[in-house]
Image: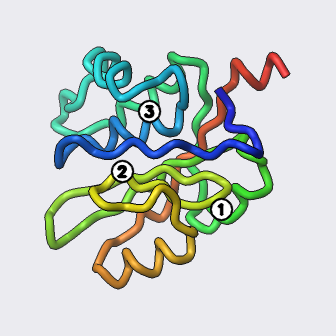
Amino acid sequence: MIISVTEMIIRIPQRTTNDCAICTVAMVMGAPYTYERVTADSARYPKISPDGKFPAWWETYFRDEGFDGMYCRFEGLYALRQFSGEVVGILNMQVPRLQRGHMVAVDEFGVIDPADNAPDHIALDDYIRIRSQEGFEFDEEWLAVRNLTHSQQS
């Protein structure tokens, strides 16, 4: 489902300290992809590759479900406004003090963070500023996501 100009991504709050990927993937995909469905579907995808790396299982999941994903330079996040919700994104970051990563959804209206006590939406510039001050380190690229099935029907 493509988010239209009048719809924003609906925030799905984290239920555990390690489920930001499930929440973010479900938010980016939209209905009918609920937290429960993405959790169940994610079991089909390996979380650790034979070489001991942690593949981004959601990339394959998106393809399997008719979504297209493409990595873009960090600055490209600001272009999401131009796509009227047809393209949304996933932004990954590292949280060195916690020794873990975190991911959020981004739409034309801003960032949707599944973390506890996060607002439903926060302006992209504000989010980057706040999280940078907190020591978060953003990846140099983000994943742009588009629903190919819906785009072909339009």
> In which quadrant of the rendered view does residue 46 lie?
top left
Q: Earlier in the sequence, mark 1 or mark 2?
A: 1
As measured in the structure, the alpha-carbon distance from the residue carrying label 3 to the one carrying label 2 is: 11 Å
What residue does disc 1 label?
76
Label 1: which secondary element: helix
Residue 151 percent location from the top left of the image: 77, 25
Tag 2: amino acid? Pro
Q: Are marks 1 and 3 in contact (CB under 8 Å)?
A: no
Label 2: which secondary element: loop
User: Is 57 above or below relative to 70?
Assistant: above
Where, quadrant-wise, is the N terminus in this rendering? top right
Tag 3: amino acid? Ala
Residue 131 percent location from the top left of the image: 37, 75
Where, quadrant-wise, is the C terminus in this rendering? top right
Q: Earlier in the sequence, mark 3 or mark 2?
A: 3
In this figure, what is the number of numbered marks? 3
Residue 57 percent location from the top left of the image: 35, 30
What residue does disc 3 label?
26
Residue most extreme to the bottom:
133
Q: Earlier in the sequence, mark 1 or mark 3?
A: 3
Q: Would residue 81 be found to the left or right of residue 89 on screen?
A: right
Q: In the depicted view, which residue is nearer to us: 12 or 66? A: 12
User: Is 137 above or below relative to 84?
Assistant: below
